[in-house]
Amino acid sequence: VGVIDYTQEVPVVEGRPPLRDIDDIIAKPLETKPDKKYYIALAITLSMLGIGGIALAASIYYGTGLWGNNNPVGWGLPIVNFVFWVGIGHAGTLISAILFLLRQRWRNGIARFAEGMTIFAVMTAGIFPLIHVGRPWLAGYLLPYPNQHSLWVNFTSPLLWDVFAVSTYFTVSFIFWYVGLIPDFANLRDRTTNKLKKVIYSVTSLGWRNSNRHWQHYEMVYLILAGFATPLVLSVHTIVSFDFAVSIIPGWHTTIFPPYFVAGAVFSGFAMVQNVLIFIRKIFNYEHIITLDTLEKMNKIMMLTGLLVGYAYAMEFFIAWYSGVQPEQFAFINRAFGPYAWAYWIMVTCNVVFPQLFWSRKIRRSIPIMFVVAVLINVGMWFERFVITVTSLSRDYLPSSWAYYTPTLTDFAILIGSFGLFFTLLLLFTKTLPVVSIAEVKAVVEGSQPSHGHNSEGGKE
Amino acid sequence: MADKVLYGYTGIFDTPDDIIHAAEKVADEGYEKYDVNTPYPVHGMDDAMKLPPSKLGYAALVFGLSGTVSALAIMYFMSVIDYAIIIGGKPFFAFPAFVPIMFEVTVLAASIATVVTMIAIFFKFPNISHPLHNTDYMKKVSSDKYGICLQADDKKFTEEEAKSFLEKLGAKDITAIYYPEENFEKQTVLEPKFISILVLTAIIVSGATYFSLNKLMFMVPFNWMMYQDKQVPQESNPLFADGFGMRPPVEGTISRGNVPYQFKGQPELAGKLLKNPLVPDSTTLALGKDKYDIYCSPCHGYFGEGDSRLNGQFPNPPSLHSEKNRNWSDGSIYHVITDGQNIMPSYATQMTRQERWATVLYVRALQRSFNAKESDLQ
């Protein structure tokens, strides 16, 4: 490849396509009938969803005894999966809000899709705490409403903070996503010839007129939402980590948890976004919009957050030793060398060792290798939640109540079902809404912004 | 054509540079009611159109802060005032523990309110029948062209001038845009289609609410908390020969703490032998009044006149102020409360011995107040 010129900004969208081509290529999946491959993919994800659905129905009918949860491991797989899926969602908000505030223009091509993933991941995550309470239809009691028992919820509990954090996160992500979609709905409204679609897009676009008097407020709202979503996304996984850190179980009661969880969430989220985008750009021919440079940048972020996570693993051991607290020291030695050592070392290998491959530029730009590494990262991050949740609970202060936790088939069926739900929603998303923001991508195509009398604006002209 | 009302004139430009220059000229010319339509926000357009900065930040600030304050106020009310419970030894007003929820509510309130403010107040959306909708002009500016629209309601606007001005700016496809005619006559709110949708929505919503609150919650599995596999009072049980779920105590035993009443069925003896252990003072009389109002007043009336509040569902009891009752000893009244008399049941299980004696004192006070002697007034 030779020497790279870092003084020139790489164009976000390759090849300077005419704006109308961008409309055509992004709207194409919405205007064509799905092909055979799509139906095969949908059949697979729906089968996974069905497996999960059956397992869930059985769990509700026969009770949570179908799961591996025991005493003392009361949290088990449902909570592991909850933390995993909430984490997956975080990349979307990071891309759409934090990278927006940092003026990373390359985010424009992937933001819509990542936001969609956020919403679906949070929906998937939301199932787990609900089913974990055993009677999901009583979840209304989590809200502080004036009820006939005249009791209120416990505002000092991190579990309640979670209710507020996750529901706020979902709502704000959804609003952010919808606000981003409004101009694209208007675009689709004006290009469609189908009468029914026209009505739908007219309603969903709310009557958007591409007016600059509107764009001005719109950009302001986008900035404000990004400004709110940024601390929000950090708060969500912070609060999820409080579920653990506020208790006094050895291995959980540490102040490093919030940053460690947030880094891990971004890490796994980016891996998932990268995995899915590799398919999307290939299938829908978005290679020039979601460029290899974008994927490389995502890999760099994965490497950075992977290092942060690795640092946290090391620091946990150091603090356990440095604090001089025996149960704490035991918890960590038990993690690495106890009955769950296999899970611990899968986690370390996948999260710390494999991402180091990204130091090489060649690997960062090789699609098959980056795909495999990202899959491994997600495996590793799932095991991280498993290790944290299960090892600490299975051996806490009271050796007489130690027990080994083995998830049952039902547990795994629900996990498979959660992937089924997530990917089913993603597949439906790709065929019903523009998975790349039309307006935002147009705004970063070379030559789409006025030159203001200068010859170029950082581009290559 | 004659009855059509003009909305404005539109012109199309090809490049972002052209539209910026054109917008600057239009603003310089003194037009106020005009708009620039572009498929994406063009940098520098706000300055070119001389638009004041967006004020939406204030909406975010106001709604965000009200979210913070109301979250704190609600949590304070619930956990300090209305139902204070000590949790984990923390103070009722555990401020650090309230911070996460205050933050979340702030973000939620600010985000929703800012977006709603923008859409509903700043844009006056939803509005899907604007004159510009469904025009070739709108189709172009949604995709890859940049357009200017000079509105007819501007003070400077005349048809000829607007047309020639757009031509001078170098605009293409200069077109007049008219209001759609039907907009003026139709009362869209009274359209049968709209009303029937409204009615249908109302029926579905109320039906679903009724169903879920009154039916669904009593169906399997939602009633499993209510009906559990256990014996509850007053239920039958086939396990026992007599079919009763509730069992009598084993013959010859008494329950813990039970002191048998030794004058059962012997009112004369009770009246003679039982002595009130309490003296009338403010505490015993207050306790007696409390218990009297709860247990006795439904039939005997608040002042013992026998004016039952049960409105003839039972025969009204005689007045407690009769000659006979006033001459009863404390022990006789105590006996009636403990053992019952005629239709009146025993209150021994509801009231402790001390409460019964206190009630006797209160009845005495009532009797004396109704038949006060002159000496009482001194």
Image (cartoon, rainbow, N blue to C red):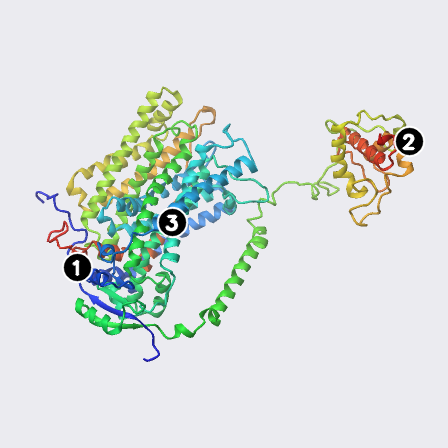
Check if mark 1 and mark 3 are on a common chain: yes
Task: Please tell me whether mark 3 sits on a helix, a strand or a loop.
Answer: helix
* Label 2 crowd (10 A; few <14 / some 14-19 / many >=20): few
| Amino acid carrying mark 3 in the image | Ala
Kindly indicate whether the residue at mark 3 contacts the one at mark 1 (C-beta within 8 angstroms): no
First in residue order: circle 2 vs circle 1:
1
Which residue, given by chain and number where applicable, does mark 3 sit on? B59
First in residue order: circle 3 vs circle 2:
3
Q: Position of residue A137 (x, y in %)?
A: 51, 47
Residue mark closest to the camera, 2 vs 1 = 1
Outermost residue on the top side: it is A324
Which residue, given by chain and number where applicable, does mark 1 sit on? B17
Task: Please tell me whether mark 1 sits on a helix, a strand or a loop.
Answer: helix
Outermost residue on the bottom side: it is B2
Q: Nearer the viewer, residue A178 or A436?
A: A178
Quadrant housing residue A243: top left
Quadrant housing residue B236: top right
Q: Nearer the viewer, residue B338 or B356?
A: B356
Q: Is residue B358 above or below residue B27?
A: above
Host chain of mark 2:
B
Q: Label 2, label 1: how many angstroms apart (C-alpha)?
A: 113 Å
Quick one: quadrant of the N terminus of chain A? top left
Which residue, given by chain and number where applicable, does mark 2 sit on? B268
Q: Label 3, label 2: how many angstroms apart (C-alpha)?
A: 82 Å
Q: Position of residue B35 (x, y in %)?
A: 27, 63
Residue mark closest to the camera, 3 vs 2 = 3
Task: Please tell me whether mark 2 sits on a helix, a strand or a loop.
Answer: helix
Q: Position of residue B286 (x, y in %)?
A: 74, 32
Viewed as shown, does residue B100 lie left or right of A26?
A: right
